[in-house]
């Protein structure tokens, strides 16, 4: 069965230097089990091919039914160095929620 | 000891809603108004202003805001805490005093926190054994020392606490952590100790929820954002803090926005790294310990927070000049909007190449197609879209190349693909790039200073 991440989770993203942080939060426990199982660091790295050029770190916050990702080397240098329209990665949470999970 | 204090966020960054702090002090009861004005690049902008005029270098919105809220805050005994002093907190304090004087206010004490500015002390720090290595690259500060625009230590809550203990009604600081602004009144009112890490972590997390203003009360809410009532008069967050470290996030009832577990959770995961180690000068907070309960409409309880001892370092935020950039755009209309924008991009790149200009990076984005999500953008049927904006940007250490790029964009209107518009505001000018250099510094090498201005 195919599930769209945006149907089971919401989130927010921002910048930490040249890394982007993306936090995604499941709407319920079942959703958290799914994102915990399927939204791995490797899967996120692959999803952001051509955007994220560094390592993807993944952290769990079961208390908030959330995962936090740090995508290194992603914002074109970050801060005022970056030429990107979205130099602070503000829209990347939405980009991650485009992901489809085969469960 | 007070049983509860109400701390209200009035500003999430310099440029945030100007009415927000006014609403916070007028639409209900609060005890503290805290305002964060400083982003990483803000300090370098302020430093440039101070270089031109030694009386500037702070958030210039502050005196105008004070004119409106000082009489109210004085009458309601609301204390104000802000890091809007930027690189010149003393000048900011004096400007506020002047406002108070013009309003006929008496018996006002303004606490000023300084000592965070180490720009003139870099050699001293190197001599003391600190290379202020870049936290991302490991490189020594020596390589950018000559291009430094600003260098500031992030102080925590305790210098503000000292100013409050000295009787300050208003505390103005330079580079203080956003979270410290909210934590400080809790330490001051409840007598929390420097070693009570769980309590300090609770106050720090309250600060994280408040530091981006309405981002915890329905602003930038990626979930069901259309359910957020009255964005036009959105209420900024208020923290009702208790001595045991528990707190409630809420907002003034008459204002818009909403406070739910979902709106608060989105802010909690914003701009964090390892959630178990949220490092501030005051403590290391554990975000995986946070518990949230909705106990009434627009009231979220936050409790269960733990944390551990702070590190022996301050974070230092330095900025330095690192070349120039420029960006401009043109808009192409149906038919074939995207095809035309892509053709224009190719032509421009060819022209820059023929001119033998030197760039570190050239970037084109097609707004309406892929500017936000790059390769993740869905393919579009260009018959269905009316326009595409080509946004073209360059970056270089060679000023002349960047300046010349600015002269190559407009000619595309008469020398390239048709149905093009949107070239207003003249040629794109080169902007100085201010690059960011995060580093760590042993705490013992700097000392915060607190002074008091009175009227």
Image: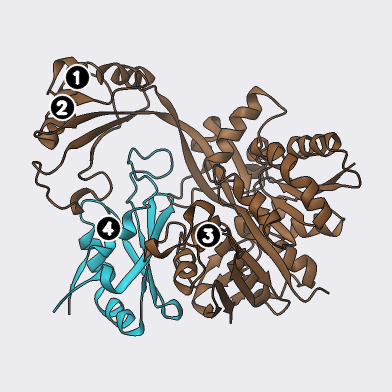
Q: Mark 4: few, some, or many residues within 10 Å (few <14, many ≥20)?
A: many
Q: Are marks 4 and 3 in contact (CB under 8 Å)?
A: no
Q: Is residue B25 above or below residue A81?
A: below
Residue at image coords 49%, 58% = B215
Is B12 positioned to the left or the right of B413 in the image? right
Residue drawn at x 55%, y 71% as measured from the top left: B298
Reading the image, the residue beneath label 1 is B412
If you read the primary sequence from the N terminus, does the residue marked by circle 1 or circle 2 appear first? Answer: 2
- Cα gap from disc 1 to disc 3, whole angstroms: 46 Å
Task: State whether residue B6 appears in this view.
Answer: yes
**Residue wearing tag 4:** A95
Quarter occupied by the N terminus of chain A: bottom left
Q: Are marks 4 and 3 on the same chain?
A: no
Do tag 1 and tag 2 residues touch (Cβ < 8 Å)? yes
Mark 4–mark 2 Cα distance, whole angstroms, equals: 27 Å
Residue under disc 3 on the same chain as residue under disc 2: yes
Along the viewing direction, whichever of B341 and B346 lies nearer the viewer: B341
Residue B344: mark in rendering: 2
């Amino acid at each position: 069965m195919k599930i769209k991440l945006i149907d089971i989770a919401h989130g927010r993203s921002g910048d930490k230097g040249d890394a982007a942080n993306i936090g995604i939060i499941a709407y319920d426990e079942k959703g958290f089990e799914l994102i915990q199982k399927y939204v791995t660091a490797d899967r996120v790295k692959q999803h952001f091919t051509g955007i994220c050029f560094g390592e993807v770190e993944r952290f769990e916050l079961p208390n908030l039914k959330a995962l936090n990702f740090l995508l290194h080397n992603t914002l074109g240098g970050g801060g005022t160095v970056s030429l990107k329209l979205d130099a602070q990665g503000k829209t990347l949470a939405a980009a991650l929620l485009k992901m489809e999970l085969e469960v | 000891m007070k049983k509860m204090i109400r701390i209200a966020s009035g500003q999430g960054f310099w440029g945030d809603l100007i009415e927000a702090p006014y609403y916070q002090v007028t639409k209900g009861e609060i005890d503290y108004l805290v305002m964060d004005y400083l982003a990483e690049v803000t300090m370098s902008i302020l430093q440039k202003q101070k270089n031109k005029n030694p009386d500037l270098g702070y958030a210039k919105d502050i005196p105008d805001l004070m004119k409106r809220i000082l009489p109210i805050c004085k009458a309601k005994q609301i204390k104000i805490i802000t890091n809007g002093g930027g690189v010149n907190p003393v000048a900011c304090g004096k400007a506020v005093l002047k406002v108070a004087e013009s309003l006929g206010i008496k018996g006002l004490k303004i606490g000023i926190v300084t000592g965070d500015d180490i720009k003139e002390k870099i050699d001293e720090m190197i001599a003391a054994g600190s290379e202020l290595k870049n936290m991302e690259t490991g490189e020594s500060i020596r390589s950018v020392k000559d291009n430094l625009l600003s260098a500031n230590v992030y102080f925590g809550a305790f210098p503000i606490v000292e100013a409050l203990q000295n009787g300050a009604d208003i505390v103005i600081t330079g580079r203080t952590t956003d979270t410290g602004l909210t934590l400080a009144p809790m330490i001051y009112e409840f007598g929390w100790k420097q070693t009570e890490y769980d309590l300090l972590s609770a106050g720090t997390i309250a600060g994280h929820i408040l530091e981006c203003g309405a981002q915890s009360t329905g602003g930038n809410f990626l979930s069901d954002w259309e359910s957020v009532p009255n964005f036009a008069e959105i209420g900024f967050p208020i923290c009702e803090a208790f001595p045991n470290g528990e707190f409630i996030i809420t907002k003034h009832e008459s204002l818009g926005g909403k406070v739910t577990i979902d709106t608060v959770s989105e802010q909690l995961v914003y701009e964090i790294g390892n959630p178990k180690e949220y490092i501030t000068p005051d403590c290391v907070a554990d975000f995986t310990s946070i518990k949230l309960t909705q106990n009434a409409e627009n009231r979220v309880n936050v409790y269960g927070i733990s944390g551990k001892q702070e590190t022996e370092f301050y974070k230092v935020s330095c900025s330095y000049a690192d070349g120039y950039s420029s960006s401009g755009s043109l808009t192409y209309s149906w038919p074939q909007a995207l095809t035309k924008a892509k053709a224009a991009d190719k032509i421009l790149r060819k022209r820059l190449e023929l001119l033998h200009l030197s760039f570190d990076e050239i970037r084109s984005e097609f707004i309406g197609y892929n500017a936000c999500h790059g390769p993740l953008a869905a393919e579009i049927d260009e018959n269905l879209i009316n326009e595409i904006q080509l946004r073209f940007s360059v970056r270089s250490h060679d000023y002349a190349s960047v300046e010349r790029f600015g002269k190559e964009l407009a000619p595309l209107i008469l020398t390239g693909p048709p149905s093009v518009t949107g070239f207003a505001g003249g040629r794109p000018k080169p902007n100085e790039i201010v690059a960011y250099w995060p580093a760590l510094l042993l705490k013992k090498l700097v000392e915060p200073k607190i002074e008091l201005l009175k009227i």
